[in-house]
Image (tube, rainbow, N blue to C red):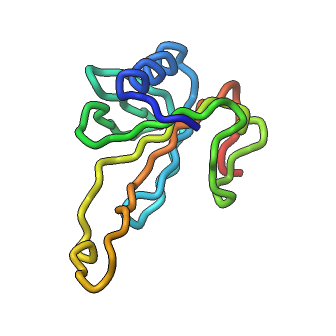
Amino acid sequence: MREISGDEAELIFRKLADEEVFVFCIGTLWGWRLMLRGKLVMGKSEVTLRAGTGGFTLRLDEDDMVFWYSEPGKMPLPESIPIPEEARDSACISVALPLRVRPGAFDVERSPVAPFREQLIFLEIRGDVPIGK
């Protein structure tokens, strides 16, 4: 897995949108888990995942965003994520969302710790691979 720039991430998202492939987006965000399958639509400096009758948009030009690209077959996914073996050979982009400050960060009795970053993982799905079964 290697860190990439926001411009590189935007190019990869744009390629996936242009190819109209399905993407599986997973993440654990502020205490809740997200799992969506859909197609990407690109706007100016943003990517929208359209999934069924819903979806969400992620701005790619926010300060303090970090992007990683994982070559096919080398993505670091947790065992608890129900990804079929066929999909594990796909490309993967991880997005670390901007840092947030928690009240515990101001605890002066302990040494500072690197803050936790919420992440979204976008996994390319080729063909009709079932997710979450």
Please state, as top left, top right, bottom left or bottom right, where the N terminus lies in the image: top right
Asked which quadrant contains residue 19, the reply is top right
Asked which quadrant contains residue 8, the reply is top left
Q: How many marks?
A: 0
Q: Is residue 92 above or below residue 7?
A: below
Residue positioned most to the top: 18
Q: Nearer the viewer, residue 62 or 130?
A: 62
Give the residue at x 45% y 46%.
Answer: 120
Image location of residue 115, percent across then percent down: 35, 62
Give the residue at x 40% y 46%.
Answer: 96
Q: Is residue 90 above or below residue 119?
A: above
Q: In the visual, does 98 lie left or right of 41?
A: left
Image location of residue 118, percent across then percent down: 40, 55
Residue positioned most to the right: 85
Q: In the visual, does 111 lie left or right of 123?
A: left
Q: In the visual, does 83 lie left or right of 61?
A: right
Give the residue at x 29% y 54%.
Answer: 99
Image location of residue 86, percent across then percent down: 77, 36
Q: In the visual, does 25 lie left or right of 86?
A: left
Image location of residue 121, percent across then percent down: 51, 43
Residue positioned most to the front: 111
Give the residue at x 46% y 58%.
Answer: 28
Q: Nearer the viewer, residue 102 or 41?
A: 102
